[in-house]
Image: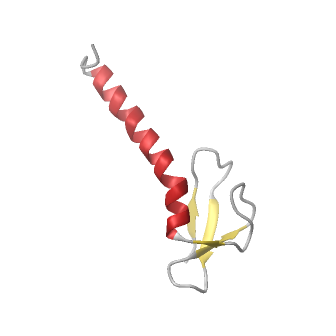
Amino acid sequence: MSQYLKLGDDQSPVQLDPHSEVGAFKVVGHCSWAKPGDKITPDFLRLRIEPWLTALFQSEHLNILIGAGLSS
């Protein structure tokens, strides 16, 4: 079963198909951060996802604080 991932600097969703190794994926098609057929592990994906997700939550948290008047 294919998985699709699109993060901040990706122009379009990246298709990840299961790799022969359990728990790993391979890139299908063009991707700026991996070559087609490269083995993509959960640890590699975590390095791509965590900074983006952290920035997203920090931004939303700041918006909530400003909206509630708690930033002053």
Vertically, is 19 above or below 31?
below
Q: Quadrant of residue 54?
A: top left
Q: Is residue 48 left or right of residue 59?
A: right
> Considering depth in this image, is 12 or 34 the residue closer to the camera?
34
The percent coordinates of residue 17 (x first, y second) are: 61, 75
Vertically, is 18 above or below 9?
below
The percent coordinates of residue 25 (x first, y second) are: 59, 74
Taking the spot 52% from the left edge, 56% from the top edge, the residue there is 47
Q: In the image as oriented, which residue stretches furthest toward the top? A: 72
Taking the spot 55% from the left edge, 77% from the top edge, the residue there is 24
Q: How did the renderer colour the structure?
A: secondary structure
Q: Quadrant of residue 55?
A: top left
Taking the spot 32% from the left edge, 20% from the top edge, the residue there is 66
Taking the spot 44% from the left edge, 40% from the top edge, the residue there is 56
The percent coordinates of residue 71 (x first, y second) are: 29, 18
> Considering depth in this image, is 14 or 45 the residue closer to the camera?
45
Q: How many marks?
A: 0
Quadrant containing the N terminus in the rendered view: bottom right
The percent coordinates of residue 72 (x first, y second) are: 27, 13
